[in-house]
Amino acid sequence: MAAEAAALLRVPGVGSTAIAKLLEPPATGAVLGSSSHAVWLVLDDAVIVVSAADATRLPNGVEIGVNAATDPFQSVRHAEPVEMGDNRILLAGLTVEVVRWWDPQPVLPSVPVAELAAAIGSLPAEVPGIDGSQLADALGRASAPAVLAAAENLLGSGTGLTPEGDDYLAGAVAALRLLGPAVGDEAVAAMLEAIAAPLAELASVTTTTFSAALMAHARRGEVAAPAGDFLRALSGRGDVDSAHAALSKVGHTSGPALAAGIVLGARSIVRLNV
């Protein structure tokens, strides 16, 4: 890889298994965007995030072994090419080698509906400034057409690097994907299968490339680490309040919206199974 000579800093990384196959063969992507804490890369129709150790671990990401204070992405520029392969990512001034992996799809135990209802309690299922009533009604009926109609109104709405409406919808979809099987709900699985392809198409034309990629991961039950902790807590493996608080602290808007979406999805499952 020719760019390797220009990479001055070499760091180990922890990669999501959701993107493992993307990092195996030689490939060339491009920088989609960057901040002090992360770099977003585009490879065909996929987005890969390389983030500092003190950033949120994302389902499509590689977490490197240094903090943002070391300014590891200072040489990275928008649209410049990025070489990948052999579990390595070569950026300007930085070589990342993935040395271990983590699974962004939390494994949830079976949970009685009554226990799930008690776990969500009075946790908020709304996002200020985002009208989630249409989505709540659609999910409460497990209606694929109604969910898609609600998604069309939510995608791209709100503020944030990933719009709040997107995060809210992604949280609800991930909750259905993971908590539905945990309570033995087959109707939810069928509804998710029905919306998979049209939701992907809708996201591709109504929101950002980065957000559409995260939505695709949510449909598969692949979530950021704090969201996984919250989902595990709702199924009885962890403290619900502390996991909810930790997720709500993520980003400026993403964490609270994801948390509210997960609660909305969980409430929908409860309503469908009582």
Image (tube, grey):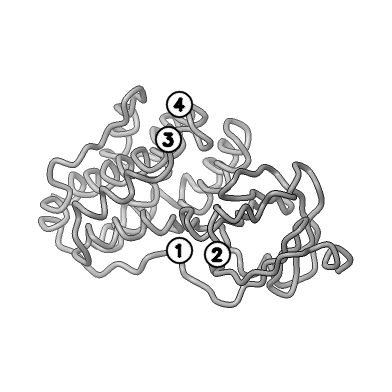
**SS label for mark 3:** helix
Based on the displayed image, in which of its 4 quarters is residue 18 positioned?
bottom right
Three-letter residue code for mark 1: Pro
Three-letter residue code for mark 2: Ala
Which numbered circle lies on residue 104?
1
Task: Out of 38 and 199, give the one closest to the viewer.
Answer: 38
Based on the displayed image, in which of its 4 quarters is residue 228 positioned?
bottom left
N-term-proximal mark, 3 vs 2: 2
Task: Out of 197 and 206, give the one closest to the viewer.
Answer: 206
Three-letter residue code for mark 3: Pro
- The extreme front residue here reads 70
- Which quadrant of the figure contains the N terminus? bottom right
Q: Are marks 2 and 1 in contact (CB under 8 Å)?
A: yes
Give the residue number, with chain letter if any, for mark 4. Answer: 158
Judged left or right of residue 173, residue 112 is left
Give the residue number, with chain letter if any, for mark 2. Answer: 18
Residue 123 appears anywhere in the view: yes
Coordinates of residue 203 in the picture (x, y in percent): 56, 37
Q: Nearer the viewer, mark 3 or mark 2?
A: 2
N-term-proximal mark, 2 vs 1: 2
Residue drawn at x 43%, y 44% is 170
Which numbered circle lies on residue 145?
3
Task: Out of 37 and 227, give the one closest to the viewer.
Answer: 37
Mark-to-mark CA distance, 1 and 4: 26 Å
Three-letter residue code for mark 4: Gly
Mark-to-mark CA distance, 3 and 4: 23 Å
Mark-to-mark CA distance, 4 and 2: 27 Å
